[in-house]
């Protein structure tokens, strides 16, 4: 889908030929005398339309407007959140039409700035996403072109561009999380990463079983040994900063299918465990967006990818394995496998001398119970990092909530037979999982995002959400350090280093 940004006068909006014109309305009345403004004024006056976020009024071939369909969409207070709701509602209403070219007007919003343009583009792309990879007759993506009309390019351009870049990352993350496990094996995931390596600024390395054994990743290997599919350890690098700059490291849980292993899961809804690589998908999506946005910083992505299967060689409850850190782990429940692959990736991250490490994982059902699908669980040993992640969640409308890490939560992980057990009791399950990970993250500022509740929607709209790509991208952009340039040569654009 193509996005374009333009300034258009009210008269031009009326005259622009398109299949659908979506007009976001947030004011009480509209002062204009053009056909669209008149329609808005009349409809509001008559009580047939409200500007509440999500309210719609549609018209077909109205007088004086060149668009085939017109949708007035209430945008409430005009905030990014209301705009998202409005655009989403309008796009859903257009879903079963033949609209190919849409004109989306933000001109009637009093203060449409960066946030508005970004929210509009993202909501559009999000609603238009269609999964088709494993359909024999893929449904056609009818919507081809979206022209976003604003009253000032200067206040919208940067937000618009960010939205377009982010949309590509979001779509990639959704795509991979939606794919069935037999179409998204560790090998295929590694190939998806390698394809990203063709984009500017990105390099990819993929380690197989032999290299991983050499590194001593005994915990990761223990999970993978129950499957015929060979594991992959994927390393992505985005180099946008100087060589000397320490990288931010993102670690994505890449369990391409989680049966639970010998501690097998119940059959109902087990199919959904194909999205147990949602953390990995969000790392791939974030790198896709980085390639578009080209910020001036260094980022490393680590993805331990394997299946969690029951098998003759699979790990058994009570088995003790040695992690890359040297710590021994008693595997009391083979279904707590995410932390077993993440702990070795955390140890690997030490050698990168990172500025910060954030792991992203569909880690616990307990986090779904605690926070549902609204906010991701966020855990951090570092207040500044926690603050930056929370702020990024707010600004990107991809919310998270900080959870506690009191040491008492680790009491249940004690065992007689190893340095640590991989599970504690049922109580506080999302936190005890985070406490397990924290043992391997002592040497750098660290945060953990539990996205079990937010990466996927069950029910009628079943599918991947692409979260937390927006949060991660906003977080990374917030980590770009202002460039120190001698005063004489300082230019207004000093913050955006070019990649010459
Ligand atoms: N992948 C699951 C967590 C999960 C559950 C993600 C539901 C999405 C939706 C994870 O590997 C797991 O099985 N966790 C166990 C941990 C338990 C054995 C301590 C859980 O949450 O039940
Ligand atoms: Mn599991
Ligand atoms: Zn899992």
Image (tube, rainbow, N blue to C red):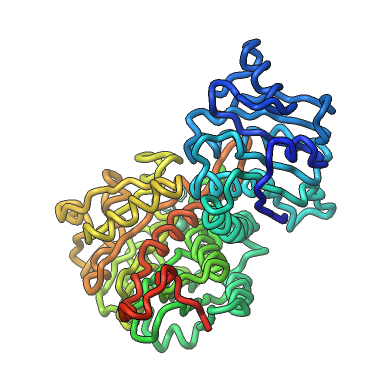
- Depth check: 116 or 276 in front? 116
Determine which quarter of the picture holds residue 14: top right
Does the rendering let one see residue 57?
A: yes
- Relative depth, front residue between 329 and 315: 329
Residue at image position (34%, 85%) is 244
Direction from residue 136 to residue 290 in the image, left or right: left
Above or below — where is 56 with respect to 180? above
Residue drawn 28% across the image and 60% down it: 385
Question: To which quarter of the image does residue 331 belong?
Answer: bottom left
**Residue 247 position (above or below residue 284):** below
Residue sitting at x 77%, y 47%: 143
Where is residue 92 shown, x and y percent of the image?
68, 35
Measured from the top left, where is residue 302 in percent x and y? 44, 73
Q: Is residue 406 above or below residue 127?
A: below
Which residue reaches farthest top? 46
* Residue 32 relative to residue 248: left or right: right
What count of labels does the image hold? 0
> Would you say residue 267 is visible in this rendering?
no
């Amino acid at each position: 889908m193509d996005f374009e940004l333009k300034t258009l006068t009210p008269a031009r909006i009326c005259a622009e030929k398109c299949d659908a014109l979506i007009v976001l309305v947030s004011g009480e009345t509209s002062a204009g005398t053009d056909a669209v403004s008149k329609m808005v004024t009349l409809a509001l006056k008559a009580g047939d339309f409200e500007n509440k976020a999500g309210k719609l009024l549609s018209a077909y071939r109205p007088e004086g407007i060149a668009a085939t369909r017109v949708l007035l969409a209430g945008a409430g207070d005009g905030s990014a959140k209301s705009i998202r709701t409005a655009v989403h509602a309008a796009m859903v209403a257009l879903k079963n039409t033949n609209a190919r070219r849409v004109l989306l007007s933000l001109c009637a919003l009093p203060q449409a700035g960066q946030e508005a343009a970004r929210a509009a583009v993202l909501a559009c792309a999000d609603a238009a996403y269609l999964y088709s990879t494993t359909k024999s007759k893929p449904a056609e993506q009818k919507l081809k072109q979206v022209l976003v009309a604003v009253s000032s390019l200067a206040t919208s351009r940067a937000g618009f561009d960010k939205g377009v870049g982010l949309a590509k990352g979001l779509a990639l993350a959704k795509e991979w999380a939606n794919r069935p496990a037999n179409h998204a094996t560790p090998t295929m995931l590694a190939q998806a990463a390698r394809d990203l390596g063709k984009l500017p600024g990105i390099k990819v390395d993929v380690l197989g079983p032999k290299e991983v054994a050499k590194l001593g990743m005994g915990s990761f290997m223990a999970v993978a040994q129950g499957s015929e599919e060979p594991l992959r350890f994927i390393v992505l690098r985005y180099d946008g900063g100087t060589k000397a700059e320490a990288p931010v490291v993102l670690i994505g849980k890449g369990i391409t299918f989680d049966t639970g292993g010998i501690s097998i899961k119940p059959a109902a809804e087990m199919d959904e465990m194909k999205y147990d690589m949602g953390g990995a998908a969000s790392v791939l999506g974030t790198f896709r967006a980085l390639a578009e946005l080209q910020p001036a910083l260094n980022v490393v992505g680590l993805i331990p990818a394997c299946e969690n299967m029951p098998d003759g060689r699979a790990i058994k409850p009570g088995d003790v394995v040695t992690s890359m850190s040297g710590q021994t782990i008693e595997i009391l429940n083979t279904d707590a496998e995410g932390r077993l692959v993440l702990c070795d990736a955390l140890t690997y991250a030490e050698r990168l001398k990172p500025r910060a490490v954030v792991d992203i994982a569909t880690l616990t059902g307990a986090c779904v119970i605690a926070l549902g699908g609204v906010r991701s669980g966020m855990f951090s040993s570092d207040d500044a990092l926690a603050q930056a992640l929370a702020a990024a969640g707010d600004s990107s409308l991809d919310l998270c909530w900080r959870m506690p890490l009191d040491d008492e939560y680790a009491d249940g992980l004690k065992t007689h037979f190893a340095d640590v057990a991989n599970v504690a009791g049922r109580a506080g399950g999302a936190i005890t999982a985070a406490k397990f990970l924290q043992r391997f993250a002592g040497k750098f500022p660290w945060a953990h995002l539990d996205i079990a509740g937010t990466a996927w929607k069950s029910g009628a709209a079943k599918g991947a959400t692409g979260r937390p790509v927006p949060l991660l991208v906003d977080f990374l952009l917030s980590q770009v350090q202002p460039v120190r340039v001698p005063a004489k040569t300082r230019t207004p654009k000093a913050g955006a280093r070019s990649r010459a």
